[in-house]
Amino acid sequence: MRGEFSFIERFLSAFPRARVPLGPGDDCAVLPPYRGQMCVTTDAVVEDVHFTRAHFSPEDIGHKALAVNLSDLAAMGATPRWFVCAVALPRDFPGRELSRLARGMAALARAHRVALVGGNFTSARELSLTLTAAGELTRPALTRAGGRPGHRLYVSGTLGEARLGLNLLREGRRRGAALLRQRRPQPRVALGLLASRFASAAMDLSDGLAQDLGHLCEASGVGAEVELSHLPVSPAVRQALGLEGALQGGEDYELLLAVPPARVAAFERACARAGERVTAVGTLTRGRRRVLRDPQGRLIPPPPGFDHFRVRPPVD
Ligand SMILES: Nc1ncnc2c1ncn2[C@@H]1O[C@H](COP(=O)(O)OP(=O)(O)O)[C@@H](O)[C@H]1O
Ligand SMILES: Cc1ncc(C[n+]2csc(CCOP(=O)(O)OP(=O)(O)O)c2C)c(N)n1
Ligand SMILES: [Mg+2]
């Protein structure tokens, strides 16, 4: 049997029952009061914009849709609590693929102990998933606006892998670490929580460090100097994209953090203890100038990143 309600049942059956006063099934979910303040975010993944059905399994699509939202919560230092999921589905979408998509999403939800509390189904020409997620703060939120001149800039993990993964998928490759970074980004939730004890500002990197750094600088009213030679870039990415290419690559879903000098040593110790990889890549500066220092010591302007509405994107 096909139909809207069988789709809803199929989708929900992949998830455990949410432990909230009222979960999926009524006109709204009813949620308990939380002790801390709540962070709320929304992000969509859209067929042929964020994934293609040829290159992503249904499980990958479900995972990525939730991961990009959890990454926003991580960037605020919030602990994910609940999400709702609006699904736009082509009429001929196979029911068993919807179950697989839900299972991919449910596996990540379980790993982060975040509950699906509601959603919506509509028919559409392309597959898309629009999620709204909320997380609880135990400390003041890590915003983009708290950076000050002299604060050290850190990035987590490695940069450029997801962009390399996209290139490799387009070349027909099926396996490898970079492909996994494109299809299954891992939100840095534990690091965000840890960083909320040390950092002055944070954001997640979805559109490339070069562009996203600009957003943090603007919000904080500062400039920045980034050392290209310090960027955490794998040999494979360095060879395929170059250091500048790694800065332009979107979808890293790593965290960019600013840390006051007095907190740097304690932050690095806490990261090492927790097994969180972070790399110091530069410094916030007075004024508005944002520059990259290349390995020869020359100062160059940051390249553009991903933009949904640029006429001919230099990076896709
Ligand atoms: N349609 C919209 N209505 C209200 N706010 C929006 C809308 N689109 C984007 N924003 C806000 O603009 C900011 C930048 O958006 P975006 O680049 O998508 O953020 P992110 O990279 O965190 O997903 C965010 O704070 C977001 O909430
Ligand atoms: C089919 C396909 N084309 C292009 C890309 C590359 N791409 C799509 S969205 C994006 C940037 C991040 O997405 P966005 O919706 O801007 O995330 P947000 O900033 O809202 O978190 C990039 C690099 C891709 N992953 N798949
Ligand atoms: Mg967004």
Image (tube, rainbow, N blue to C red):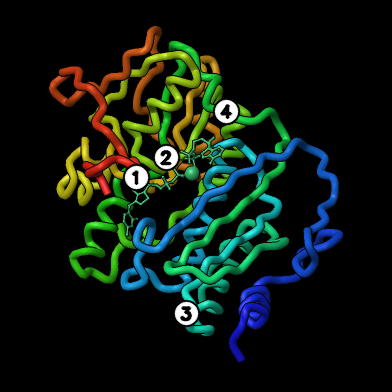
Name the amino acid type tagged 3.
Phe
**Secondary structure under badge 1?**
loop
Pick whichever, 94 or 275, lies toward us. Answer: 94
Q: Which residue, given by chain and number where applicable, does mark 1 sit on?
A: 250
Mark 1: C-beta under 8 Å from nearest atom of ligand 2: yes
**Secondary structure under badge 2?**
loop
N-terminal of the two: label 3 or label 1? Answer: 3
Depicted 176 relative to depicted 197: above or below: below
Between tags 3 and 2, which lies in front?
Answer: 3
Marks 1/4: CA–CA distance: 20 Å
Depicted 89 relative to depicted 137: above or below: below
Mark 3: C-beta under 8 Å from nearest atom of ligand 2: no
Q: Which residue, given by chain and number where applicable, does mark 2 sit on?
A: 205
Name the amino acid type tagged 2.
Leu
Name the amino acid type tagged 1.
Gly
Residue 241 location (% of width, % of height): 18, 45
Marks 3/2: CA–CA distance: 32 Å
Q: Please state the total of marks drawn on the protein image.
A: 4
Disc number at residue 143? 4
**Secondary structure under badge 4?**
loop
N-terminal of the two: label 2 or label 4? Answer: 4
Q: Which residue, given by chain and number where applicable, does mark 3 sit on?
A: 93
Q: Is residue 132 visible?
A: yes
Farthest residue, direction top:
286
